[in-house]
Image (spheres, grey):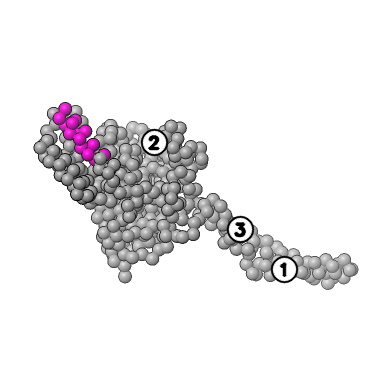
Amino acid sequence: MTDQPQVQYASRSDVGMRRAANQDSVVIRLSGEYQEWIDCGHLFVVADGMGGHSVGDLASRIAVESLPIAYFKIDAESIPDRLRSAVVAANRAINDKARENPEFADMGTTCSTLVLSTAGAVVGHVGDSRVYRVRNGQIQQLTFDHSLQWEMVRQGRATIDNVDMLHPRNVITRCLGPDQNVQIDIEGPFSVQPEDRFVICSDGLTGHMTDSEIGAIASSMPPSDAARLLINLANCRGGTDNVTVVVARVEKFPTLNGPFVDTVTEPIAVGAKDTSTKPRGSLANRISMTLFLLLGVTGLSLLALGKVQLGLWLICPALILGFLSMIVSTNRQAAESSALADTAEYNPAAIPGLQPPDGSRPAANSPYRVAPADIDAGFLELLAQAQSELTTAARENGWKADFDSLANMNRQALAATKGKKLKQCVQIRAQAIDDLMKELYAHSRNG
Ligand code: CA
């Protein structure tokens, strides 16, 4: 019997500082009943809509409405199958709507989904929103960005160092909506352990925050505080886009059997055919080929010796055997190449330069990137700087901030750092930044 897990989570979605409307959407559906947990697990979805005439929010809204309905209703053999079918259903729902009205024609949305289940963590993904796992001081990006930049790096037409100069940041290469069919990345299953954190977010967050910063915040605070600080910092740094984030903290999770892609020990050579495991043909097939040659050669020899009738008696069964062997062999080759095509779809070619240099990357392609997620001195300094700059802005603009309280929090944060209570320092800075950002929002959004 598998116990139900305990997952603490929070989600926030914010319009940002520059946009008039929020085109991001988010939905979380936890399994209620025990049987539902066994069949479906818990579902988390972030969708980032796009399109003219403000229809991007319609696309992302249809995604978060239709996907969970399909996910919990579909009959499926496995969690990955269920997830793939649900994303297909969401794509179809958006595409159907787009064809109803010319104004909806160009609408689309990213869709990043995470399922925590008895199969482990399974990800279904289209677009450049992201799913991360934070564990043991590391943040791992489980999704491949379907963006022009990542595609160029994958194809070797840019490097991770020069891609920002060569190609724009926000061009995506795949999304839900525009086409009736869509290619979906299913990643995992990944193992899940107590104390793991999962983060799902739109590019409004990753455009302003590094992976390490996201990891440090997600791992050091309760999910609701982490989500609030992440959004505040993205907005503090310009808030150029809508920003949405889900933070989930695994408190208790049943022990799972796997197999998981992050515990596989043999590396998979993506794109290269693995000849070592290729069957050389079944025993029956090899026997029939040997008989074909034996009968054929003997029959031809008898014909040459003038024994026509006996020769023909041997050649006829030889031809039948040869024909049957050929059919079996052709079918096998077709089955093998279709299996290879499936593997390639699940394991898109790895990206040079996006992998960590220390070789700690697991066998499968995901995680695509790994970064440290510790609270270090540099990160604490960034938070102190954000508080200081916001305090200056508050003074200069005459906001109603409680400056005594802010000064007090500053002293407490410095004392916590000195006493190596790093999480406590982050918590105090986060509170101060939130107090100040509330003033900033009140003044920038009303004015
Ligand atoms: Ca966006």
Relative depth, front residue between 345 and 193:
193
Residues 388 and 167: in front is: 388
- Residue highlighted by disc 3: 333
Residue drawn at x 26%, y 39% is 382
Q: CA distance from mark 1 to mark 2?
A: 61 Å
Tag shown at residue 184: none
Q: Which residue is mark 1?
A: 290
Q: CA distance from mark 3 to mark 1?
A: 20 Å
Does label 1 or label 2 sit earlier along the sequence? Answer: 2
Q: Is residue 33 above or below residue 186?
A: below
Q: Secondary structure at mark 3?
A: helix
Q: Residue at image x 38%, y 40%?
A: 108
Q: Nearer the viewer, mark 1 or mark 2?
A: 2
Residue 11: x, y in percent?
26, 47
Q: Is residue 409 above or below residue 34?
A: above
Residue segment shown in magenta = 382-396
Above or below, comparing residue 250 to residue 371 in the picture: below
User: Looking at the image, which residue is at 31% across and 56% down?
Assistant: 196
Q: CB of residue at label 3: within 8 Å of ligand 1? A: no
How far apart are the two marked residues, 3 and 2, measured between alpha carbons?
41 Å
The residue carrying mark 1 has its beta carbon less than 8 Å from ligand 1 = no
Q: Is residue 110 visible?
A: yes
Reading the image, the residue beneath label 2 is: 170
Q: Nearer the viewer, residue 329 or 359?
A: 359
Residue at point 72%, 68% (across, down): 290
Main SS of the magenta part reads: helix
- The spot of residue 173 in percent (x, y) is 44, 40
Quarter of the C terminus within the rendering: top left
